[in-house]
């Protein structure tokens, strides 16, 4: 299929603070022929604020297929289209997947205009390991279903990131405490970029107490981040220890751990953690 000359721009918008709007996002939104917005009424103040006077069509993933087809037709006709959601990055727990998928299937160029995303903002301020993380989106609304999903993550060593609605925050934290215990570290990142922004890191039992005792913490938008399971390695075999020590003298720790894992058959993460605990100066 021929590549159309038009572009579908996937444009991030602020998650609270209008000053986080990227200049490039403003420029693109002013110059496209059409904006596909999750909710045109919701986006109207933002577009007005930045003097963007481009026709807006409502688009969400439940829009009938005619809407997707109509947008693709406009693109195929050579008109640029921008996709926005109510806030943050489209497609990240937001509509847009069907449209972007359809664009690719039709050989249309897709161009991201990066900007705010609550998940990334929360992760960057959490102080939890970011080398490996798992974005789990929204948890189920009902407690039993939520506990089932949380139980599936019990042994995950990556940092876990969840979006949560404020009225479910306390129940979700209580379910996390049931599944992961009192001591697992959790971060609450609330109202990011807004007046009552809060980033708090506590063991689960303390977080439950704190949120329960302060109803203000149960308001606004929030992201929950959970520290992954730390693989405990108290000691290595003398041979593995020697291998790790020698390699760590010559290589960065991660590389040394990867190589030592191949030589010894032990887990890379375990060797890396041992080196961090034992060899740090
Ligand atoms: N696409 C958006 C993004 O890039 O972050 C997320 C959309 S999702 C429908 C909305 C959820 O994102 C909220 O329920 C909350 O969990 C999180 N969120 C959005 N804005 C936030 C903010 N300012 N502070 C904390 N969490 C936020």
Image (spheres, rainbow, N blue to C red):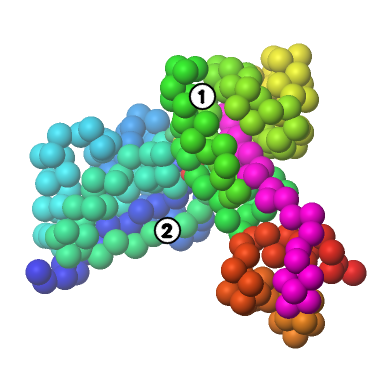
Q: Could you say which is closer to the camera, residue 163 or residue 269?
A: 269
Q: Which residues are magenta?
A: 220-243
- Is the C terminus in the top left, top right, bottom left or bottom right quadrant? bottom right
Say above or below: 59 vs 196. Answer: below
The percent position of residue 210, horizontal first and vertical second, equals 76, 21
Left or right, residue 104 beside residue 268 = left
* Residue sitting farthest toward the right: 281
The residue closer to the viewer here, 8 or 138, is: 138
Query: Can residue 155 be seen from the camera position used here?
Result: yes
Q: Residue at x 42, y 58 (%)?
A: 113
Q: Residue furthest bottom?
A: 250
Depth order, front residue of 211/160: 160
Position of residue 68 in the picture relative to residue 28 (left or right): left
* Residue position for label 1: 147
Residues at marks 1 and 2, CA–CA distance in whole angstroms: 36 Å
x, y percent for residue 23: 50, 58
* Callout 1: SS: helix
> SS at mark 2?
strand
Along the viewing direction, whichever of 19 and 111 lies nearer the viewer: 111
Q: Are marks 1 and 2 in contact (CB under 8 Å)?
A: no
Q: Is residue 106 left or right of residue 161?
A: left
Magenta-span inclusion, residue 256: no
| Viewer can see residue 195 | no
- Relative to 162, is 278 on the left or the right? right
* Name of the residue lying farthest toward the front: 238
Local packing at callout 2 (Cα closer than 10 Å; few below 14, some 14-19, many 20+) is some
Residue drawn at x 35%, y 29% is: 41
Name the disc covering residue 113, or none. Answer: 2
Q: Which residue is depicted at the point 63% across and 39% down?
A: 226
> Quadrant of the rendered structure where residue 131 is?
bottom right
Residue 237, magenta (yes or no) = yes
């Amino acid at each position: 299929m021929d590549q159309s000359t038009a572009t579908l721009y996937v444009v991030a918008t602020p998650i609270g603070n209008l000053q986080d709007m990227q200049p490039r996002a403003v420029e693109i939104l002013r110059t496209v022929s059409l904006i596909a917005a999750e909710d045109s009424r919701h986006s109207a103040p933002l577009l007005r604020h930045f003097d963007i006077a481009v026709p807006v069509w409502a688009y969400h993933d439940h829009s009938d297929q005619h809407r997707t087809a109509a947008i693709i037709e406009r693109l195929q006709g050579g008109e640029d289209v921008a996709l926005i959601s109510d806030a943050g990055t489209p497609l990240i727990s937001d509509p847009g997947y069907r449209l972007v998928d359809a664009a690719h299937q039709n050989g249309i160029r897709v161009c991201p205009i990066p900007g705010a995303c609550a998940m990334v903002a929360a992760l960057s301020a959490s102080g939890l390991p970011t080398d490996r993380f798992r974005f789990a989106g929204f948890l189920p609304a009902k407690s039993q279903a939520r506990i089932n999903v949380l139980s599936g993550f019990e042994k995950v060593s990556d940092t876990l990131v969840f979006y949560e609605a404020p009225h479910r925050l306390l129940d979700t934290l209580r379910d996390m405490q049931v599944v992961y215990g009192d001591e697992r570290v959790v971060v609450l990142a609330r109202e990011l970029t807004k007046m009552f922004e809060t980033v708090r890191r506590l063991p689960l039992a303390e977080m439950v107490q704190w949120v329960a005792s302060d109803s203000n913490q149960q308001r606004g938008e929030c992201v929950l981040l959970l520290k992954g399971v730390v693989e405990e390695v108290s000691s290595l075999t003398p041979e593995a220890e020697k291998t790790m020590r020698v390699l760590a003298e010559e290589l960065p720790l991660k590389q040394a751990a990867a190589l030592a894992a191949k030589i010894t058959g032990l887990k890379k993460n375990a060797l890396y953690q041992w080196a961090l605990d034992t060899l740090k100066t």
